Image (cartoon, rainbow, N blue to C red):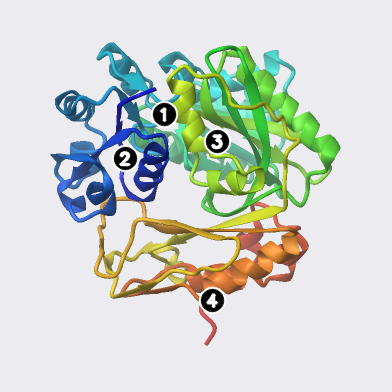
Amino acid sequence: MFKKVLIANRGEIALRVIRACKELDIETVAVYSEADRECLHVRFAADDVCVGRPPARDSYLNIPRIIAAAEITGADAIHPGYGFLAENAEFANTVRASNIAFIGPTAEQIGQMGDKAAARKLAQKLKVPTVPGSPGPVESMEEGLKVAQKLGFPVIIKAAAGGGGKGMRVAPDTEQFAQAFGLAKQEALAAFGSDEVYIEKYLSRPRHIEIQIMGDMHGKLMHLCERDCSVQRRHQKLIEEAPSPAVDVTLREDIGDAAVRLAQAIGYVGAGTVEFLLDEDGSFYFMEMNTRIQVEHPVTEMCTNFDLVKEQIRVAAGEPLSFVMNGHRLRGHAIECRVNAEDPARNFQPSPGTITAYHPPGGPGVRVDTHIYAGYTVPPYYDSLLAKVIVHGNTRAEALARMRQALDSFIIEGVTTTIPFLGRVLRHPDFIAGTVDTMFLEREPQLLKNPA
């Protein structure tokens, strides 16, 4: 087992990894930017190193500084968390070339799944259903238009190296295709350094279903059931739950088997998530694979009573999976709400500032993963996630009641948060009925506004 793990991240995920390491009796190293000097991950780690100025490119994305921090503190492993360098194949390569273990998949596996067009080709080869679309990146607008006309409008243009909802544009018809194509290429280049795009048929009311997988170095690989992440804005998730209200036992087996086949084809090691779109007719389509732990991993932990982050660390140290479940160990229902420092009424405009009052919810089945406290200043440089509220109940109805109670008693003052908005979503008849899809908020814009 590792002696010292450096966490190449910040915020709540850095604290989450520190907790897992402490349970495994592993020392930790925090890295931080000048803006994060007062962050709790810096306080709770055994060692800490400042890696640069507040902009992420000067600190959390600076590979040489992260490696240097690991070397000077004697860390023998690096956990990348999510975001920042978590899915950067060059980083994974550099870590291992520096004789430091990378807590995650190999650089080759990150590269294979990070290229969305290449991942689609692999899925097609394995007979995993994919949304009808171009076989690979399209070279020109004219070629793209021909593909779109063959597929039938609407279509969605996606960055081949994309993720997180960036570099994606919907073209509703021929007239608007050229503009959408140009904007998608521009966004892709700005966000990922590559303007390669591919085209897919646009599903108008799909659900977003993902399968959590975990593999070890001994050839064992399992899935830990699905999560439903259909409540989104601008392709970014806001509420997640497990299991999905739309998935029955047969569909769980089929979609889980598809995810495992994809991961096994590349000998996947570590935690990963295979993401699918579930159409209204019950058809599912492979979308992409995230080669890291995800923000919403706690709902799976609550439903399986299984610590995914500890397992990540064990697997990276060469230990075998502690058990194999493949979807047969679900207990109850879990829901996660992401609390962001944002104003939904102003198009989710970020709301940095100092938190003047903080009181988290509690009670049976309530978990809060957060890095904030009264007096903490939310910096303007990073993702606006403040906290994740996760609840578990014996039934979905009990979990819903617990989440409503938790949000109603969660006090954060000093910055605008999404708490009131999340409470309104949880009381909407469609959410209560479990019938939402990824276009839910577009159809219900009144949920974004505070009642007069």
User: How far separated are the C-alphas under marks 2 and 1?
Assistant: 13 Å
Q: Quadrant of residue 304?
A: top right
Q: Are marks 2 and 4 in contact (CB under 8 Å)?
A: no
Front tag of 2 and 3: 2
Residue with the mark numbered 2? 9
The numbered disc on residue 87 is 1
**Label 3: element kind:** strand
- The residue shown at (22%, 30%) is 66
Question: In the image, what residue type sits under mark 2?
Answer: Asn
Q: Are marks 2 and 3 in contact (CB under 8 Å)?
A: no
Asked whether, in this view, residue 371 is left or right of residue 234, the answer is left
Q: Quadrant of the N terminus?
A: top left
The reply to whether residue 138 is visible in this rendering is no
Question: In the image, what residue type sits under mark 3?
Answer: Ile
User: How far separated are the C-alphas under marks 2 and 3?
Assistant: 31 Å
Q: Position of residue 246 (x, y in %)?
A: 78, 49
Residue 328 vertical placement versus 265 (above, below): below
Front tag of 3 and 4: 4
Sequence-first disc among 2 and 3: 2
The reply to whether residue 92 is visible in this rendering is yes
Question: In the image, what residue type sits under mark 1?
Answer: Glu
User: How far separated are the C-alphas under marks 3 and 4?
Assistant: 39 Å
- The residue shown at (39%, 32%) is 86
Asked whether, in this view, residue 149 is left or right of residue 215, the answer is right
Question: In the image, what residue type sits under mark 4?
Answer: Asp
Q: Position of residue 13 (x, y in %)?
A: 39, 45
Residue with the mark numbered 3? 157
User: Considering depth in this image, is 1 or 110 the residue closer to the camera?
Assistant: 1
